[in-house]
């Protein structure tokens, strides 16, 4: 712009055209932003997800503990059958009892937490 020649005032048509162009740019930016933002919709609430995770972890723990209990049972039975003295055989049978008792306790606690505890939700409220 030349300072010697003042600019002519804008006409109303120019002002409307400029405002419409600005409106289109803002609208396009909003639409592009809306398309590229990730959708955050909750499929399940926190407690449903926690129950699902607890059951998943329990099933993995139950599978691992069952495999280990079976392996240790096989070792205890083979140890009992291959032992030379009655004392060693009795010791192997005692280990077998301990293995299965530990398996029952581990899986019992896991089953209680995963399946029985949710049945008691909401019972400790005063109304």
Image: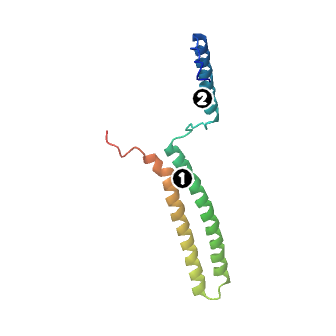
Are the two marked residues, 2 and 1, in contact with CB atoms closer than 8 angstroms?
no
Say which residue label 1 marks.
Answer: 54
Label 2 residue SS: helix
Mark 2 to mark 1 CA distance (whole Å) = 41 Å
**Quadrant in which residue 39 is drawn:** top right
Q: Residue at x 68, y 83 (%)?
A: 82
x and y percentages locating residue 43 in the rendered image: 57, 38
Residue at the far bottom: name it: 85
Label 1 residue SS: helix
Is residue 77 shown above or below 119? below
Q: Residue at x 65, y 88 (%)?
A: 84
x and y percentages locating residue 55 in the rendered image: 56, 52
Q: Nearer the viewer, residue 66 or 13?
A: 13
Number of the label disc, if any, that sits on residue 20: none
Say which residue label 2 marks.
Answer: 30
Q: Residue at x 64, y 35 (%)?
A: 36
x and y percentages locating residue 17 in the rendered image: 62, 15
């Amino acid at each position: 712009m030349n300072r010697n020649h003042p600019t002519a005032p804008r006409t109303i048509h120019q002002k409307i055209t400029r405002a419409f162009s600005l409106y289109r740019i803002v609208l396009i930016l909003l639409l592009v932003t809306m398309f590229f933002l990730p959708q955050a919709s909750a499929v399940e609430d926190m407690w449903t997800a926690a129950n699902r995770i607890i059951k998943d972890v329990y099933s993995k723990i139950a599978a691992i503990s069952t495999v280990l209990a079976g392996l240790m049972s096989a070792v205890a039975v083979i140890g009992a059958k291959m032992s030379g003295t009655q004392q060693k055989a009795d010791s192997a049978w005692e280990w077998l009892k301990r293995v299965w008792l530990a398996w029952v306790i581990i899986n019992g606690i896991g089953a209680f937490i995963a399946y029985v505890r949710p049945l008691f939700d909401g019972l400790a409220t005063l109304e």
